[in-house]
Image (tube, rainbow, N blue to C red):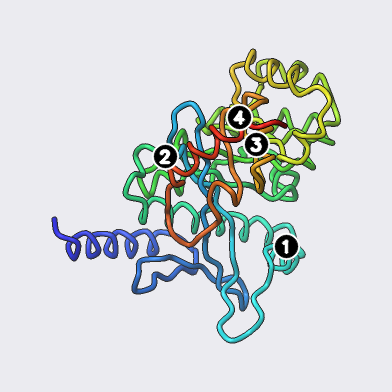
Amino acid sequence: MNKTGINTSIKNEFELIQSATDYALKRDEKGWISGQFYQCELTSVFQPVWGIDQGITLGHAAYVRSKAHGQVALWPWQVFALASKDEQLIDLDRLCRAIHALNYYFNNTSKANTVLFVDVHPRLLESVKDDHGRAFENFLDLIGVRTSQVVIEIPAIVNRNWKLLQHVITNYRSRGYRIAANYTGSRIDWMTELGSLYPDFVRIEAGDLQRHEAVAALVDTIHSYGGSLLVRDVETPAQLSAAIRAKADYLQGNLIGKPQNLIKEAELLPISELADSTVNSKP
């Protein structure tokens, strides 16, 4: 099938999906999809997540952006602040994930081999008492994507509510999603107490990783429970060096690749060379 045929097929599929949902969606001439919430037009940007051992891009983390149209574009937190009621917040959060999934799996040539990281708003986790991820699973079924191709990122603030953290991990995992939790450094025995509910990925900020006094023990615990360490917000060679010395499994940050409104893999050779140079340099 030629490029024109592919674009026509995607357009037809998008129209079918749009007719089957209540989301206010539109597709531009380049195939990028956006959604409407009040006066905000929302779209996606994607940041690559790099696998150190594999030497490939594991997937991409999705973030929402508000398009300007001649006015000042709102920051994501400002958009979510518009959803003052729980029902509005739930609709907005689900809309954002739908936009991310459509953009990622309609515009990603290597979609069969990569995963999509999406976050959820902490208010949604508290508002939806059970069946977390069911609505998104129904949408993924509609576009032919397995839940195992999606990583749900649990907000760090949920660590304050231990029962809620355990509850949402159980809910999402029962539906086949992979889980990423954020380590905040507040509990040394964090992974141990999670037990069988351990997340697939533990995310830690690069700056926190450098300041953490028990990095080796933390990483050993993560790996002993079958999890992977994802160091995010890697901005400098020094932070990259610290992540590699800590035996991180995955990297994310502007040094690896900036968020963009296209699906782009991290540059393999420059990253490999930079990793080698930081490992061999003095800390």
- For badge 4, the amino acid type reads Val
In whole angstroms, how far apart are the C-alphas of marks 3 and 2? 18 Å
Labels 2 and 1: the sequence-earlier one = 1
* Precedes in sequence: disc 1 or disc 4: 1
**Are there few (<14), some (14-19), or many (20+) residues within 10 Å of tag 1?**
few
Instruction: Report if residue 71 is visible in the image.
Output: yes
- Label 2: how many Cα within 10 Å (few below 14, some 14–19, many 20+): some
Tell me if I can see residue 171 in this picture: no
Q: Report the residue marked by disc 3.
A: 231
Q: Quadrant of residue 81?
A: bottom right
Q: Which residue is mark 2?
A: 114
Q: Please tell me which residue is depicted at 62% across the width and 75% down the height of the picture.
A: 38
Q: Earlier in the sequence, mark 3 or mark 2?
A: 2
Mark 3: amino acid: Val
Q: Position of residue 91 (x, y in %)?
A: 61, 59
Q: Gap between marks 1 and 3, in whole Å?
A: 23 Å
Q: Horizontal and vertical percent for residue 252?
A: 59, 43
The amino acid beneath tag 2 is: Thr
SS for callout 1: helix
